[in-house]
Image (cartoon, helix red, strand yellow):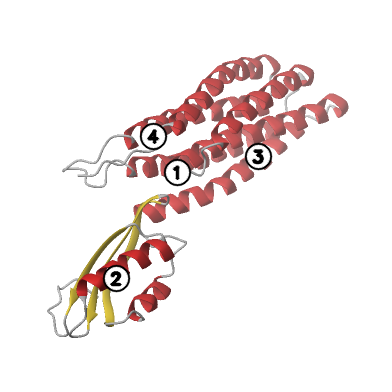
Amino acid sequence: MHEHTHPPRSTKYIGIALGITIAFFIVELIGGILTNSLALLTDAWHMLNHIFALVFALIAAWLALRPITMKRTYGYYRAEILAAFLNGIFLWAVAVFIFYQAIQRIQQPAPVESLNMLIIAVLGLLANGLAAVSLSRSKDESLNVRGAFLHVVADTLGSVGAISAGLIMFFTEWYLADPLISIMIGVLIFYSSGKLVRDSLNVLLESVPSHIDVSVLEHRIVGLKGVKRVHDLHVWCITPTKMCCMSGHVVVEKGTNRKKLITTLIDVMKEEFGIDHTTIQLEDEGYPKAVGEH
């Protein structure tokens, strides 16, 4: 079996982000309690959620480094997709929690020590910014790292919201700014995590990758010399950036050089569609079909 390894730098950057997030969660939680700020407390609790998400992302990235075996012929890449999907769900849970807490605070407004809140929120913005910069270097490597990056971005938005609320309350003493800005943060978090959930779910359902049009791919195959038609065509991927796969049955004309045709098909799939794992069955007219073929 061939061994495929995921670039190890992603685990390094997730680890850095995790360390920063844990350190500032403690600071923000204590600060939120002392200043009675919902924005800080909300940000602290959803930062705890992000700590769990980053731990899960780190474990998934580590699993992806394990080699392909006879029992895991695709390796452990899908562990990262599961992590990305669960991270997206965690983000939705964070948004719901923020909405609930904000509604409670709107119904029962409470004074906030805005100056201390501002100081802690600024420190939080710096910490989250460092974590985001770290993860941004490898966020395009996998959905897992992108999920971790979105969690840190959500924390950064929380810090920006807390700063905004702190400034408003410091100058106007309008304490409803705290829960209202928290709701705005929740909306942004919910929206930003939607694509992550959708993309990871598409992979788990083995949908066609977004960059491939199956009808175009089919026409390209049928247009090759010696090909009469294609059936039972499937395209999927193990992750959006790893091991894009295609399988299909190609009905060929008599006298076709099959070795040359297979070579051409492999090259076309790789160069034009980014498919690096192909399973192609060449058939003559009238070959029997399995029940599940289409």
What distance separates the C-alpha of mark 1 from that of mark 4?
9 Å
Residue at image location 53% in from the left, 26% down from the top: 17
Say which label, 4 or 2, has the lower sequence index.
Answer: 4
Residue that numbered label 1 is attached to: 142
The answer to whether the residues at label 1 and label 4 have Cβ atoms under 8 Å apart is yes
Say which label, 3 or 2, has the lower sequence index.
Answer: 3
Horizontal and vertical percent position of residue 289: 15, 76
Closer to the camera: disc 3 or disc 4? 4
Residue 38 relative to residue 65: left or right = right
Secondary structure found at label 2: strand
What distance separates the C-alpha of mark 3 from that of mark 4?
28 Å
Closer to the camera: disc 3 or disc 1? 1
Residue that numbered label 3 is attached to: 185
Q: Is residue 183 above or below residue 167?
A: below
What distance separates the C-alpha of mark 3 from that of mark 1?
25 Å
What distance separates the C-alpha of mark 1 from that of mark 2?
26 Å
Residue that numbered label 2 is attached to: 233
> Could you tell me the amino acid type at mark 4?
Ala
Secondary structure found at label 3: helix
Residue 151 relative to residue 265: left or right = right
Say which label, 1 or 4, has the lower sequence index.
Answer: 4
Say which label, 3 or 1, has the lower sequence index.
Answer: 1
Residue 268 relative to residue 118: left or right = left
- How many numbered marks have been drawn onto this rendered protein structure? 4
